[in-house]
Image (cartoon, rainbow, N blue to C red):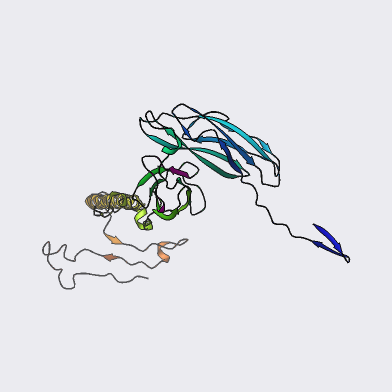
Amino acid sequence: MITLTGGTLAVSAAPATAAPETVRILSVSAENVKPNETVRVRFRVTNNGSRAETAIIVVGGGLRCTSGCRAEPNLGPGRSQTFDTTLVAPTARPGEITGLNISIGVRLAGQNTYDHKMVYVHGPGASSSGGDKPAAGVRGVSGRVRDAGGKAIGGVDLTIRDSAGHEFRTTSSPSGQFSITSSAGKTIAEGPITVRAAMDGYRIARTTVRGSAGDVATVRLTLSAVAPPTKTSPSPAAEASPLAAAGDGTPEAAPPTLKAVSDEGNSSSRFFLLGGLLVAAGLGALALVVMRRRNAPDAAAETDVPSTTQLLAPAGGSMADAPTAVLHTGPVGGGFPGSYGAPPQGGFHQNSYRG
């Protein structure tokens, strides 16, 4: 109500209404059915956003869906739409009553939302009256498993244990959802309920919630990833060595010593060749000297030249103009006393100088 008093605008505060649920099951045709009986379900989907969105609706659970199993309506902001679906109950063992969930899942504006409804299937010989429902206890336990970053984890093994020591086992779906329900043969006792989640690569998570009779206990579990073992990186020297790959138990052998290729061999060959040439030249020269010594007496006899040393006249003059000295190299008495005898005293005679 808005009133205007003395120029002042007064607005009376009205209680805020909560936004409707994104998906809600409105009715189920029967909660106690026999195998192969039909169950009709009506539910409503609401777009609580500020713009039009396309909703993806999927009907699942323990009953087989035959019609209205999937829909993708376009909903305007704040608009709702009602849907009908038909399901068929599965078979059950004689004399047993099995509790199964009907699940309605909706993805809208990037968010997944679910609603569940329990239906009891009575096997042959079991009473279908409402009085034969399971004994009073917790209707069920449902929840979701996520990692530390908020991402859903599928395939997680879950063990639920109630206050009476009953254990229930299930596995999370790809969206991280899981649920169990009470049955006639195994009722979930009210009181503390412990849920254990385990999966390879993650630490085991446990949480305890309190279940009340007739209600569904909701559980939220977060798994922390196990850090992978650290690997010690090998040193650069070990990486460079080809023997490192042989293992730690194999002793390292000293690498073979390699000699760098150089011109040492070629230089040695040249030196040997040069030395050989020098030796050959020396031998040739020695042979030539020996031959000349052998041929020297014959040449002297033929030319009849005395063994003297003469001074030649200078160029442009005669022998009379140049001083001449003649040196006799032979012994005075016509020879030495012996082959190795010493010459007689004063055995060398030098002619007088003629000028």
| Magenta stretch encompasses residue 103 | no
Decide if residue 154 is in sight here.
Answer: no
When asked about the image quadrant of residue 335, the answer is bottom left
Q: Quadrant of residue 334?
A: bottom left
**In this rendering, would 158 be left or right of 53?**
left
The single residue placed furthest to the bottom in the displayed view is 345
The residue sitting at 65% across, 49% down in the picture is: 19
Estimate the x, y position of residue 59 in percent, counting from the top left. 54, 35
| Residue 242 placement, left or right of 18 | left
Which residue shows up at 54% across the image and 42% down it?
A: 115
Within the magenta stretch, is there residue 184? Answer: yes
* Magenta region, residue range: 177-192
Q: Residue furthest right?
A: 7
Side of 86 relative to 322 (left or right):
right
Image x and y of residue 319, in percent: 40, 62
The picture places residue 351, in percent across and down from the top left corner, at 28, 69
- Front one among 275 and 149: 149
| Number of numbered tags placed on the structure image | 0
Residue 165 at x, y percent in the picture: 33, 50
Q: Nearer the viewer, residue 42 or 152?
A: 42
| Residue 4 in sight from this viewpoint | yes
Q: Is residue 340 above or below residue 251?
A: below
From the viewer's side, name the closer residue of 166 and 283.
166
Quarter holding the C terminus is bottom left
What residue is at 57 percent from the left and 37 percent from the top? 27
| Nearer the observer, 216 or 339 | 216
- Which quadrant does the N terminus fall into? bottom right
Residue visible at 60% across and 32% down in the picture: 84
